[in-house]
Amino acid sequence: MPLTAAGPNASLEEFAAAWPESELQAVRDFVARGFSSSKIHKSYRKITYLPAPRATGSPGRPQRAPSTPQPVLESDRPPGPNPCKFGPANDQTMVEVRIPLVNVDWCPAYVSENIRRMEAGRVNAAGELVVRSSTFAFQYPNYLACLRQIDQLVLAAAALPAPPATPRQERAAALREASNESRIRGKKHRSATKDARRS
């Protein structure tokens, strides 16, 4: 279903209303199975190393020219005993991970379209979700941080509106509200009585 079906500024309720029940059930099943970005096939994950942001140097001190980004093949775990040394040993510790959102089978169409609706600034012209991390001094922890970001974004996009309240739930809510109002009135009455006795 195209994103324009409900509009980019539609509420979650309006967005979900534009989808058939079969797609909404697919989203429920997707969430029930549990999602992790590690389940996305390697061919979908594109990794690029970028120079880590640097603080501005001292006045008059020449700055190092930024290195050219190095696209690399994705690997779930780096080779060797030290997982922190992920990728080439240089100053390119920022990691960028891109995953496609158009015509994919790793998530329901509802989820991919909702990511495009909610995170338009993170989706490039090719329809890829782009996340970056430069929190750590090594590439592999930054790569894992990118995967955690993807997990959070996907699960947020898989949210569905709360179902409408049943008559029984509406009656229970009305009773709770009436009980709360009665408690507040009683409290005010007791407070007024105490004030009257002091005067």
Image (tube, rainbow, N blue to C red):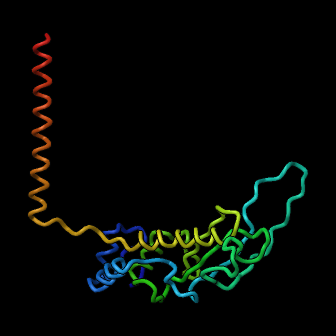
Q: Is residue 81 left or right of residue 102?
A: right
Find residue 110 and report its horizontal and vertical position in percent. 38, 80
Q: Is residue 97 left or right of residue 37?
A: right
Q: Residue at x 58, y 68 (%)?
A: 145
Q: Residue at x 66, y 79 (%)?
A: 78
Q: Residue at x 47, y 75 (%)?
A: 116
* Viewer-nearest residue: 43 or 2: 43
Which residue is outermost to the top?
Answer: 199
Question: How many marks are shown on the rendered structure?
Answer: 0
Q: Residue at x 36, y 80 (%)?
A: 33
* Viewer-nearest residue: 26 or 77: 77
Relative to 176, is 170 above or below? Answer: below
Find residue 111 and report its horizontal and vertical position in percent. 41, 78
Q: Is residue 156 left or right of residue 178?
A: right
Which quarter of the rendered picture does the C terminus lie within?
Answer: top left
Find residue 104 and report its horizontal and vertical position in percent. 48, 88
Which quarter of the rendered picture does the N terminus lie within?
Answer: bottom left
Task: Find residue 2 and report its image quarter.
Answer: bottom left
Find residue 167 and report its horizontal and vertical position in percent. 9, 64
